[in-house]
Amino acid sequence: MSEKILMRATNVTAVYAGEEGADVPAVDNVTLEVPEGEILGLAGESGCGKSTLGNALAMIANPPLYVLGGQMEIDGQSIGLTTLGKSANARHRPYRGQVVSMLPQGAMNAISPTLRIRRLVCDVVHAHHKDMPRSEILDRASDRLDMLGMPKRVLDQYAHQLSGGMKQRMVTVISTLLDPHLLIADEPTSALDVSSQKQLIEMLLAMVEAKIMRGVIFITHDLPVLSMVTDRLAIMYAGKIVETGRTEDLVHQARHPYTSALLAAVLDPTEATRTKHVLGIPGAPPNLGHPPTGCRFHPRCAFVKPRCSAAEPAFRDEDGHLVACWWAEANPGVTVPVEVNLA
Amino acid sequence: MTETAPAPAGAAAAPVVLAADHVTKQFRVAGGKLTAVDDVSVEFREGQVLAVVGESGSGKSTLARMLLRLLPVTSGAVLYRGRDITRIKGADLRRYWHDVQAVFQDPFASFNQFFTVGHMLRRSLQTADLGGETAEQRIERCLGYVGLKPEDAVYKYPHQLSGGQRQRVMITRALLVDPKVLVADEATSMLDASLRVSVLNVLQDLRRDLGLTVLFITHDIGQACYFADQVVVMEHGQVVEHGPTDDVIFNPQHSYTKRLLADVPNLKGSLKSQRLG
Ligand SMILES: Nc1ncnc2c1ncn2[C@@H]1O[C@H](COP(=O)(O)OP(=O)(O)O)[C@@H](O)[C@H]1O
Ligand SMILES: Nc1ncnc2c1ncn2[C@@H]1O[C@H](COP(=O)(O)OP(=O)(O)O)[C@@H](O)[C@H]1O
Ligand code: SF4
Ligand SMILES: [Mg+2]
Ligand SMILES: [Mg+2]
């Protein structure tokens, strides 16, 4: 299969500058790609660096966050992601919202309740196209709503009149009005009820089918949501990607012990959930200022061996399913036995 | 698992600890009244985990606050061990507040950032009957129930704890006064799945080891499935379905329950491939 790659980001490193040089490298040398027309899920426990990576890729990092390195190839263009240097902001501006658009975490709560939605739509577009007439913007927005089966009257309503689910769908539509190549959606479903989650997911899928955007990075710690909506998953732990591949492969044949532990902790309303007893991952995620040596998961891993703390495992590529783990290296093709996570 | 789902006969035999009897709550809002809880009757039996599930706005928290006597009822009664406590005051009410403890969603909100965890726990013990234990012994015992050692928590400030540790400390605080009922309102909703499961395990152990009755309020029917004995489903302030967990989740009768279950995302299927046929 020779898939066309829409976006490839290589060696992205981003740090939060701390006092007296105590920097927190929240994203450490990450490489990631999104094939044309696909949705990539980015998962991992909170604090592992998902939003930081999203901000670095969307070129919206602000101090104290600095992108120290990383290159993005997208649609034939090559963009240096680093925010070091005076011209970085001016260099990145033309890409924001149009090549890569970010739907930030909590965006729907950030809208002022007394703002009319049409006003918000115009403000967002004017930030990129100062001179586009309002009538043109609103025509575009109402065509878009029509196409997605959403009521056009929403444009005339105030934010406080919309339900949480409708508000979240609206900010998603607005953040893609300029037809970005890549949409990065940070926790878009986390504050929604299941029914609104499903509506948002279906709308995103419809948008990808309609080629409104050519790829999506969907960030959440919610694996069931990701398994419904994504083509691929990347699992992040303590600032690094540890496993990535096709969604069904990761969900059914997890190769990394951390992925397996996350999957075991999923509680969906099934017979399996009713009868299982999940151990939970012992300990807590590390302080990213002082990450563990070798494999960063080693203090919490059921498979840990001495070499795990001595050296960092490299990625092993098994037919596009990538995993960085010494156990996986020694057990090629073997799915992590889920029993280690259960009592 | 049989230990999480006692036989119906055993369930029926356990005495009712707490009950809502035709409880209604109306709020005055601009342009009229909003009925947040509408004629709800439910019984909580000793040593059971009862989950109240429903979408946001369905009235779960309002019901919990009335049961906790933090919010007056508009009509109906709250019964504790068969006694109407809807209007008790003073020492009676304080005793009730010892017996029925609450753990809420955001552990950060209820923590004073300037005091250590130990300070906060000792303050909670001020009005408690220690029955021969010292405060330190009581704190150590209760931290033990949630899998924490004193050195993990007592000298720490809230911001030095992880989300899961904070929520365990909040459970510890509730346990210090030797409660009979624990009301957990979305207590695990902000936690990652792996931490969530460890907190649910703690609640399950407390039920087993201390005979605690747990009222577990959640919008997440999957968590109810993991460890509740009984499930109550609320929609628009009303109880639309109520029964043993296996019946409600695997053989739902009400259309709302069915829809709720149908919309829960799972690991089994991709909507994308379903759409493509
Ligand atoms: N404003 C900030 N200043 C300093 N460190 C931060 C800041 N925001 C996040 N971090 C650090 O970066 C890490 C990753 O954060 P984030 O990307 O928000 O994680 P996630 O989105 O996976 O929950 C956190 O563990 C935290 O240590
Ligand atoms: N103090 C209040 N004043 C007015 N309306 C309220 C108040 N508290 C809750 N409500 C309303 O009551 C309904 C039920 O809310 P709540 O009990 O918080 O639901 P849940 O916990 O299931 O999300 C909602 O419509 C909410 O807006
Ligand atoms: S490298 Fe070692 S510690 Fe890390 S996940 Fe693999 S087995 Fe576990
Ligand atoms: Mg985040
Ligand atoms: Mg609530």
Image (spheres, rainbow, N blue to C red):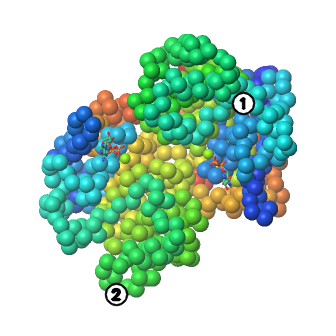
Q: CA distance from mark 1 to mark 2?
A: 66 Å
Q: Amino acid at mark 1?
A: Arg
Tag 2's secondary structure? loop
Nearest the camera: A247 or A148?
Answer: A148
Q: Amino acid at mark 2?
A: Gly
Residue A9: where, in percent of width, then height? 80, 35
Instruction: Give me the residue at 38% from left, 85% from top.
Output: B133
Q: Chain of mark 1?
A: A
**What residue is pinned by disc 1?**
A96
Q: Can marks 1 and 2 be said to lie on one chain?
A: no
Tell me the crowding category of disc 2: few under 14, some 14 to 19, or many 20 or more residues within 10 angstroms, Cα based.
few
Residue A305: where, in percent of width, then height? 76, 61
Ligand 1 has an atom within 8 Å of the beta carbon of the residue at disc 1: no
| Image quadrant containing the C terminus of chain B | top right
Nearest the camera: A82 or B169?
Answer: A82
Instruction: Give me the residue at 84% from left, 23% from top.
Output: A76
Task: Specify the label residue B132 is tagged with.
Answer: 2
Is residue A11 visible from the viewing direction of this image?
no
